[in-house]
Image (cartoon, grey):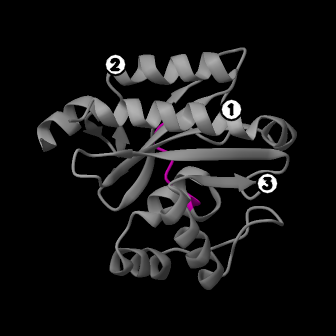
């Protein structure tokens, strides 16, 4: 099973995880439907890494995000979703090793507050951040799960905060569906 998971999500190469053509096609379809860039993140060792970005000239990615990006998990929707999947011990280690520095005025910098957010993410199986990573930007992420139900990645989309407010339900629906479809290809 692990071989199938690795084959579908890709190969680790110099801290980068590369998506297969099948996954890229799914992400591109979500990008076109949502008219916004779509991201795939995955665990690589103990890091949360952007594995693929489905963007286009009409729907460009966030300038700071690139394949291999592994910073600021505490202020990104995909990061929060994947932090919520860690065991208590893994999360404790992550928080001890990394600073919860503010990126914007809305960034979560308190470990207790972050833990509360992660409890909500675990319960709802969706993560949202609005203007925590970048002013006027919002992101929503849904889990990619293994056949055993473990979160092994995330599908997310970023839009303006105003766009998020007006399209939150549609964004959530497509992100959940895309993550589910990627997950279903793992079994």
Q: Is residue 31 magenta?
A: no
Helix, strand or loop at mark 1: helix
Q: Nearer the viewer, mark 2 or mark 1?
A: 1
Q: Is residue 70 magenta?
A: yes
Q: Residues within 10 Å of mark 2 (few under 14, many from 20)?
A: few
Magenta range: 67-73
- Locate residue 81, reporting x and y percent: 51, 57
Image quarter where the N terminus lies is top left
Q: Mark 1 and mark 3: span between their CA atoms?
A: 19 Å
Above or below, 124 against 163 in this view is: below
The residue at which mark 1 appears reads as 170
Q: Mark 3 and mark 2: span between their CA atoms?
A: 32 Å
Q: Nearer the viewer, mark 1 or mark 3?
A: 1
User: Earlier along the polypeptide chain: callout 3 or callout 2?
Assistant: 2
User: Earlier along the polypeptide chain: callout 1 or callout 3?
Assistant: 3
Q: Are marks 1 and 3 in contact (CB under 8 Å)?
A: no
Above or below, 95 against 122 in this view is: below
Q: Residue at x 78, y 45 (%)?
A: 137
């Amino acid at each position: 099973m692990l071989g199938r998971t690795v084959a579908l999500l890709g190969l680790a190469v110099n801290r980068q995880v590369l998506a297969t053509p099948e996954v890229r096609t799914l992400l591109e379809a979500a990008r076109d439907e949502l008219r916004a860039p779509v991201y795939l993140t995955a665990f690589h060792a103990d890091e949360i890494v952007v594995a693929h970005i489905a963007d286009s000239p009409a729907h460009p990615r966030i300038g700071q995000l690139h394949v291999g990006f592994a910073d600021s998990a505490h202020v990104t929707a995909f990061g929060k979703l994947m932090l919520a999947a860690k065991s208590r011990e893994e999360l404790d280690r992550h928080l001890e090793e990394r600073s919860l520095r503010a990126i914007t005025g809305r960034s979560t910098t308190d470990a207790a507050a972050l833990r509360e957010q992660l409890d909500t993410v675990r319960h709802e199986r969706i993560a949202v951040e609005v203007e925590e990573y970048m002013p006027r930007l919002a992101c929503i992420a849904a889990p990619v799960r293994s056949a055993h139900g473990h979160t092994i990645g995330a599908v997310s989309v970023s839009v303006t905060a105003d766009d998020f407010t007006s399209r939150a339900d549609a964004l959530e629906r497509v992100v959940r569906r895309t993550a589910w479809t990627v997950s279903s290809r793992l079994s």
